[in-house]
Image (cartoon, rainbow, N blue to C red):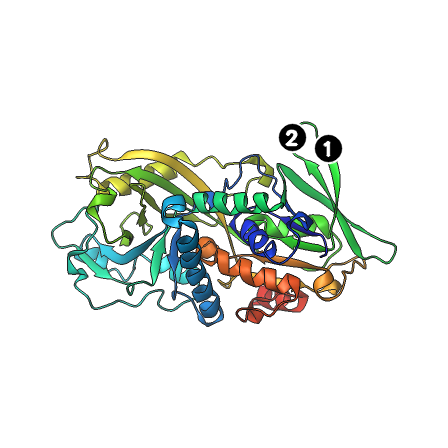
Amino acid sequence: MSSTVILGAGIIGVSTAYYLSQHQDPTSIQLVEPSPELFSSASGYAGGFLAKDWFGPSLTALGALSFNEHRRLAEEHGGREKWGYSRSTCVSYAASAAARDSGSRGDDWLRHGTSRADAAPVIQDPLSGNTPGWLRRLEGDHIELISDEGSTAQLDPLLLCQFLLQECLQRGVKLHHPAKPVSVSTDAKGELVGIRIIDTKPSATETELPCARLIITAGAWTGQVFQTLFPESDLQVPIQSLAGHSLVLKSPRWHTGLESKGCHAVFATHTQGFCPEMFSRLDGHIYFSGLNSSTLPLPDAAAGKATPYKEDLAQLRQAAREILGTGPEAEDDLEVVREGLCFRPVTAWGTPIISRIRDGDLGAGVVTRPGAEGGVYIAAGHGPWGIAMSLGTGIVLAEMVQGRTLSVDVSGLALDGNRARELSAN
């Protein structure tokens, strides 16, 4: 099999390596990750909410494939114990009639980010008493079920990433960390044959890796990586970043014994200018987020974990006290276990890119081996659905790279120079 280099060892990268290694010599696969701390952005700091059918037409099949694969992997490898996989009941919550009538639902930003008119249809069901015990209930509030049974689930993404990476390493996949790509190497015919990387440690050692198949899964940094490696290309990879702050909380009202039917996902309407979302986890923690920004500057990928902004964390804490505490002044009622800031890769049109890049878009006469023997590939831009779509993306991208029949059609997610210009114009 051709040597394969994957740039970016987040959840998309390790998922791709995992499924590639099932069909080729794992020692021919190399992962390159610049951050000194593995999974230090969205892959480790996301909520881990999974949905089967919250997607538009171009993602329907991929969403179902990925959701079913999450369940299969958890069943076969003890996912409940290893990475907190659990089915989830999803509800929409408004603390008052005024908030409910504001026209803003807790999943609005998700609906916008995935180009779906209704991210989740309201299910006419009284919840059968299955309201999360850790949610503060107020007179006049409103809660409704927005997921069918078995159509949503929950996990801890950091633990899933660590499992996938460990499986890859045990099979023989090589990890270069921390290291970043510098340039590609070509032979006399201009054919891609290698990639040079440099350690981001003080030693700054350069290494040449053989590479006929290059896969860029660098999240919000994907466009930067492509431009670094192919500086004469006219292709603009339209990946932007959506920053999100989060808290991991411990509440005295939530522990696994209280909710034997599984975890809850709560999308709330709030009056502080954002719509909080909360996901309970099997370890007794509650992930609290929803405060997002497209204007925060994207840090250097080699800088490691991003430092959260104090004013944003304060806003999150205040909202958490009001929604999850015993009252607005119950500051000591909730324990903050972890604070986070991550940068999700997004596209302006709301769907990811999963594509082989045409040789003509690489610039400087760079070409790749035909068919499954070579190629440059990109998988990024999943927005808030990176964890949910990760396994399905890994399966399909591995099939694409290896020239196998694709499990689902992702032709609508392809990117070339002409389409990039068309999307930018719109």
Q: Quadrant of the C terminus?
A: bottom right
Q: Residues within 10 Å of mark 1 (few under 14, many from 20)?
A: few
Q: Residue at x 83, y 57 (%)?
A: 190
The residue under label 2 is 201
Percent coordinates x, y for residue 393 in the rendering:
53, 60
Compare residues 126 and 149 and report the one nearer the observer.
149
Q: Residue furthest top?
A: 202
Q: Quick check: 54 left or right of 19?
A: left
Pick out the residue farthest to the right: 188
Which residue does the numbered mark 1 point to in the structure image?
Answer: 205
Side of 246 relative to 376 (left or right): left
Residue at the spot x=36%, y=64% of the render? 119
| Callout 1: SS | loop
Task: Tell me which corner region of the image, top left, top right, bottom left or bottom right, holds residue 380.
Answer: bottom right
- Answer whether residue 237 is visible to the viewer in this image: no
- Give the quarter of the figure containing the N terminus: bottom right
Q: Nearer the viewer, residue 391 or 98?
A: 391
Residue 404: % across, % down: 62, 67
Q: Is residue 18 left or right of residue 270?
A: right
- Element under label 2? loop
Q: Amino acid at mark 2?
A: Lys
Tag 1: amino acid: Thr
